[in-house]
Image (tube, rainbow, N blue to C red):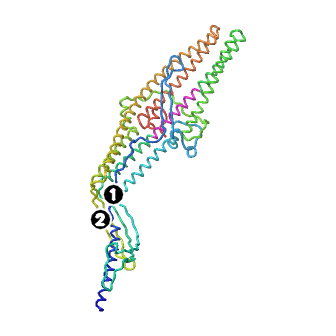
């Protein structure tokens, strides 16, 4: 009898120990024997690689009818929109004396113009994405502590038996399991992860070139607006000189009226001319004030016209360069074409990553720590595993990723071709505008000489009483218009040189030479 009871007790102990082992082993398997995570997918690039930043800088020189009957002039203009038209305060960090040179304006624009903000933030995002892609190539370390208490329903496992004098309980436990581990995982061979990182690196490179191109646009915006202020101020000086001449003629007509050498009609004509010139002066003064405010907004100065320009850009021929040589130089130096090339490379790497989803990948995992029942002694435990993942069928995801990557690559290649074509067109247009503006300056200079001589002759004839002052007034008006033509021509020529510097790439390195300035700041 005692022997049978002893056997029953041994059976009970064995069953309980077996159940404890069953629960603990099932717990460990749940922790380290879980199904491996699915392999990473290829990064998908947006369809278009064009920057999403709004606004830009455009310099145009459209032909319009001239103010004189003998000349058709180019109408130069610099258009700045979006963030390029604004800036942060530069005087808080760069003292301002009240006189602004062109190179100082460019330096302030490069540091404080908002045109580079969007591309800078986009570049930071690209760098963050590249770091995220690189993390998949590096070991991942983690640690965890788990204290589990569990009960088991034996009937749920199909365990249900009894013997005389012994009945197996329906629910056993609770069982307490403590597990403390450090874990490490590493991708050993995964072409998708590698090509994803390569694609992210090329995207960062493209972002760096886009940021450089935005700086080039800031140079174009600031320098073009500076030239525009110079031209507007020259129109003011011309209007003042014309008004002084008109006042002198009006006073002379008044004097001659007293001596009977002029009529009241002559006085009225000269008076009307004075009023017209006063209106012209007011208009040009208003324009130059607005242009100076625009320049201040580009360079971070207080938005008012209360400052002076210290540079006056004279006429000087552009440095000699052949058209074909200029096109080659532009295609080699322009930041936007380099950015487009980097985007093509990024799309090629993204396509390679998508195709690599079909290839096997190898990863390793390991952990080490203490595990056991807290009431007893914890024992060292470790797990080391290597996983070879062989793709068989993933529901068509790989095929769709490849199609998306191929579409992005075709778009990037088309954008690269368009960028190269656009750059060549910009160089050719800059050459055409430069030649036309140079010819226009020469014609305007000749017109000024001829009309000045004509004005002198008509004044002499009016003084001698041969002609009326209407001829003098017409000659004065022609001279004023020709001066405006010359100012526009000089502005068009300098803007064409600036456009050529931009078209060739790295305008900051060329602008001092092209516009005959001091070296770069």
Q: Dot 2 lies on which element?
A: strand
- Which residue is the site of mark 1? 38
State the predominant SS element of the stretch in magenta.
helix
Question: Residue 157 location in percent, x, y?
Answer: 32, 72
Magenta span contains residue 78: no
Report the front residue among 268 and 386: 386
The stretch of residues the image draws in magenta is 214-235
| Alpha-carbon span between mark 2 and mark 1 | 16 Å
Mark 2 or mark 1, which is nearer to you? 1
- Mark 2 surroundings: few (<14), some (14-19) or many (≥20) residues within 10 A: few
Q: Which mark is residue 385?
A: 2
Measured as percent of width and height from the top left, residue 489 is found at 50, 24
The foreground one among 218 and 51 is 51
Label 1 element class: loop
Can you give x and y, in whole percent of width and height, for residue 11 in the image?
Answer: 30, 83
Residue at point 40%, 72% (across, down): 148
């Amino acid at each position: 009898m005692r022997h049978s009871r002893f056997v029953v007790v041994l059976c009970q102990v064995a069953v309980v120990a077996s159940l404890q082992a069953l629960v603990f082993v099932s717990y460990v398997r749940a922790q380290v024997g879980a199904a491996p995570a699915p392999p990473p997918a290829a990064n998908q690039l947006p369809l278009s690689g064009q920057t999403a930043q709004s606004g830009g800088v455009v310099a145009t020189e459209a032909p319009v009818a001239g103010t004189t009957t003998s000349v058709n002039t180019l109408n130069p203009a610099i258009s700045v929109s979006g963030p390029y038209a604004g800036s942060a305060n530069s005087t808080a960090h760069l003292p301002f004396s009240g006189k602004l040179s062109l190179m100082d304006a460019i330096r302030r624009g490069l540091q404080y113009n908002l045109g580079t903000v969007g591309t800078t933030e986009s570049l930071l995002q690209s760098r963050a994405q590249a770091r995220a892609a690189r993390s998949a190539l590096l070991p991942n370390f983690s640690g965890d502590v788990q204290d589990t208490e569990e009960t088991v329903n034996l009937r749920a496992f199909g365990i249900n038996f009894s013997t005389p004098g012994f009945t197996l309980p329906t629910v056993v436990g609770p069982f307490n399991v403590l597990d403390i581990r450090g874990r490490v995982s590493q991708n050993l061979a995964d072409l998708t992860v590698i090509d994803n990182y390569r694609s992210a690196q090329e995207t960062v490179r493209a972002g760096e070139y886009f940021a450089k191109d935005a700086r080039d646009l800031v140079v174009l915006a600031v320098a073009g607006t500076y030239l525009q202020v110079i031209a507007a101020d020259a129109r003011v000086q011309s209007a003042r000189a014309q008004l002084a001449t008109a006042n002198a003629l009006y006073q002379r007509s008044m004097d001659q009226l007293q001596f009977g050498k002029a009529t009241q009609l002559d006085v009225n004509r000269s008076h009307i001319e004075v009023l017209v010139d006063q209106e012209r002066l007011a208009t040009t003064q208003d324009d130059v004030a607005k242009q100076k405010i625009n320049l201040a907004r580009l360079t971070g100065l207080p938005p008012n016209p209360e400052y002076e320009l210290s540079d006056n850009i004279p006429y000087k021929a552009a440095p000699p360069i052949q058209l074909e040589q200029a096109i080659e130089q532009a295609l080699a130096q322009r930041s936007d074409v380099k950015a487009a090339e980097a985007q093509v490379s990024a799309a090629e790497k993204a396509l390679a990553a998508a195709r690599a989803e079909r290839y096997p990948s190898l990863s390793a995992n390991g952990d080490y720590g203490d595990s056991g029942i807290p009431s007893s002694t914890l024992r060292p435990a470790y797990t080391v595993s290597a996983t070879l993942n062989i793709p068989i069928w993933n529901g068509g995801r790989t095929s769709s990723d490849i199609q998306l990557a191929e579409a992005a690559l075709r778009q990037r290649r088309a954008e690269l071709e368009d960028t190269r074509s656009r750059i060549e067109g910009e160089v050719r247009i800059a050459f055409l505008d430069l030649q036309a503006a140079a010819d226009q300056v020469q014609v305007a200079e000749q017109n000024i000489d001829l009309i000045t001589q004509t004005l002198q002759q008509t004044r002499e004839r009016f003084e001698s009483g041969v002609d009326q002052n209407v001829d003098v007034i017409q000659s004065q008006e022609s001279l004023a218009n020709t001066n405006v033509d010359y100012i526009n021509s000089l502005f068009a020529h300098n803007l064409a040189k600036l456009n050529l510097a931009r078209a060739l790439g790295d305008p900051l390195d060329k602008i001092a030479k092209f516009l005959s300035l001091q070296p770069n700041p």
